[in-house]
């Protein structure tokens, strides 16, 4: 007779992404518009420091700065790190270096990709130049990357030229796509919880020290600091401990507003979980209301909770779970 193997812990790829829209002031707007026109602009602070990329306020004095200057499209690597496995949407799809490049005429460095055949071809102090993108729209990606450029260094005494920052069809705003790809694993305890939900059961875990039943389970009691391995089936009915009325419709959520979202203490659980309340007008939901889960065909978790028709629970029975 062989022992049953433990269930496989769940893993799933997840993506968090959203577009971040922001307006641009006269300094950063001029910088991005300049990139579209193959011009690199910096800003000069009160002490003569040339900052690239430009900032709107002096990082030392916090004074507003507006004096734009044009710097060269060539520069020097000040430090770098090799990236042998480019991620999706990074500047290059082959291995490259992330490099801080101080452009000629600037006193600060710009971070961007450096296209090089390998890490042995990159070193601090190497000369590089901008490789412009074939299609430019007024974004930092108008600099496709930097590339090695053996030009002997900047001309002695060369200084950045003043620039009025005026261009046709100036860029006034940008949309930055923020995205995070990762693999999530809920762990042993929540894997068992999720698998039980697919069978229309709600399973928590009891702390062997304080006997509190956690739903969803956490794998350990945060109060006692000991593992929770004793599984306990709770519910299915429960009690509304507190709630809120939602009046703003969320994108891609096919639920009419207003609706109620509540904390629900399932019978036998030591803390409340949250769920939507349905089957009752929103203004009739109340603390102490007894509810039960409603499952949709093929659903892996309750769609919402509805009243059971039982009398309301006494406040003393759930006050510690609010």
Image: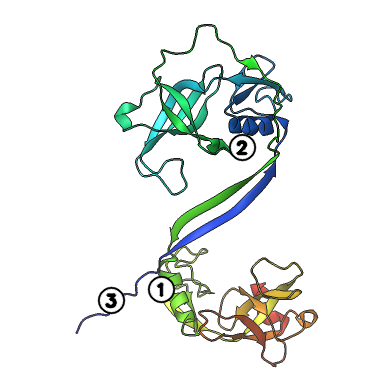
* Label 3 vs 2, first from the N-terminus: 3
In this rendering, the label closer to the viewer, 2 or 1: 2
Image vertical order of residue 236 relative to residue 54, above or below:
below
Q: Position of residue 291 (x, y in %)?
A: 65, 85
Question: What's the residue at 40%, 66% (across, down)?
Answer: 11
Instruction: Identify the mark nearer the N-term, 1 or 3.
Output: 3
Q: Which mark is residue 126?
A: none
* Side of 263 relative to 9 (left or right): right
In the picture, the quarter occupied by the N terminus is: bottom left
Q: Secondary structure at mark 3?
A: loop
- Element marked by disc 1: loop
Q: Which mark is residue 138?
A: 2
Residue drawn at x 77%, y 69% as measured from the top left = 247
Residue 5 - label: 3
Q: Is residue 178 left or right of residue 90?
A: right
Q: Disc 1 versus disc 3: distance between alpha carbons?
A: 16 Å
Residue occupying image coordinates x 62% and y 17%:
49
The image shows residue 27 at horizontal and vertical percentages of 69, 29
Q: Which residue is mark 1?
A: 229
């Amino acid at each position: 007779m062989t022992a049953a193997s433990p269930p496989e812990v769940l893993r799933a790829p997840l993506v968090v992404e959203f577009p971040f829209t922001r307006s641009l002031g006269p300094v950063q707007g001029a910088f991005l518009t300049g990139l579209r026109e193959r011009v690199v602009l910096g800003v000069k602070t009160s002490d003569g420091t040339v900052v690239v990329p430009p900032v709107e306020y002096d990082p030392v004095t916090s004074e507003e700065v507006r004096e734009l200057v044009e710097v060269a499209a060539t520069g020097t690597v000040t430090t770098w790190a090799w990236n042998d496995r480019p991620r999706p949407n990074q500047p290059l799809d082959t291995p490259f270096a992330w490099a801080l490049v101080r452009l000629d005429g600037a006193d600060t460095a710009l971070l961007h990709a450096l296209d090089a055949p390998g890490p042995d071809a990159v070193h601090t102090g190497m000369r590089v130049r901008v490789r412009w993108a074939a299609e430019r729209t007024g974004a930092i990606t108008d600099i496709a990357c930097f590339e090695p450029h053996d030009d002997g260094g900047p001309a002695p005494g060369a200084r950045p030229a003043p620039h009025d920052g005026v261009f046709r069809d100036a860029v006034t705003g940008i949309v930055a796509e923020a995205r995070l790809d990762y693999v999530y694993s809920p762990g042993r305890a929540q894997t068992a919880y999720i698998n039980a939900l697919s069978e229309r059961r709600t399973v928590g875990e009891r702390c062997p020290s304080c006997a509190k039943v956690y739903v969803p389970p956490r794998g350990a009691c945060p109060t006692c600091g000991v593992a929770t391995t004793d599984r306990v089936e709770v519910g299915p009915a429960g009690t509304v401990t507190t709630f809120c009325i939602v009046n703003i419709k969320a994108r891609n959520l096919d639920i009419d507003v207003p609706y109620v979202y509540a904390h629900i203490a399932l019978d036998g659980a030591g803390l409340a979980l949250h769920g939507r309340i349905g089957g009752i007008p929103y203004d009739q939901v109340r603390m102490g209301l007894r509810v039960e889960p409603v499952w949709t065909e093929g659903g892996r978790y309750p769609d919402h909770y509805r009243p059971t028709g039982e009398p309301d629970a006494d406040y003393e029975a759930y006050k510690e779970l609010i």
